[in-house]
Image: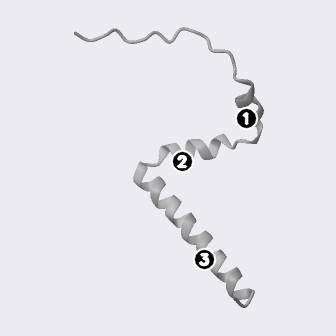
């Protein structure tokens, strides 16, 4: 026998920590990323990692190490 779905009528009080961070969060980026598939998000993360690694390598090379 299936259980009844939980009711979501209760109003939650805003979390002060979440409210403090909201002004610094770009929600459009969150929405954009949530539209991507899991695979697309992973590919995007890997591309960012490769870019960061390349920047690190170029800095090491520029410093003569």
Residue at the disc numbered 1:
22
Label 2 vs 1, first from the N-terminus: 1
Q: Which element type, helix, strand or loop, lies under badge 3?
A: helix
CB-based contact (under 8 Å), mark 3 and mark 2: no
Which residue occupies the foreground of this view, 20 or 31?
20
- Report the disc number at residue 31: none
Where on the picture, by quarter, is residue 39? bottom left
Q: Secondary structure at mark 2?
A: helix
Image spot of residue 11 (x, y percent): 61, 11
Is 42 placed left or right of 64 in the picture? left
Residue 44: percent from the left, percent from the top? 51, 59
Mark 3 = which residue? 54
Label 2 crowd bin: few (<14), some (14–19), many (20+), radius 10 Å: some
User: In whole angstroms, how far apart are the C-alphas of marks 2 and 1?
Assistant: 17 Å
Q: Residue furthest bottom?
A: 64
**For marks 3 and 2 on the same chain, the one whose residue lies earlier in the sequence:** 2
Give left or right: position of 39 versus 54. left
Question: Residue at left 56%, top 46%?
Answer: 32
Q: Residue at x 62, y 47 (%)?
A: 29
Screen quadrant of the N terminus: top left
Residue 33: which numbered mark, if any? 2
Check the picture and name the quadrant holding the C terminus: bottom right
**Sequence-wise, which precedes: disc 1 or disc 3?**
1
């Amino acid at each position: 026998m299936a259980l009844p779905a939980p009711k979501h009528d209760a109003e939650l009080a805003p979390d002060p920590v979440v409210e403090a961070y909201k002004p610094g969060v770009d929600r459009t980026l969150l929405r954009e990323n949530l539209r991507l598939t899991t695979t697309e998000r992973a590919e995007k993360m890997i591309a960012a990692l490769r870019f960061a690694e390349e920047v690190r390598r170029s800095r090491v090379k520029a410093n003569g190490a």
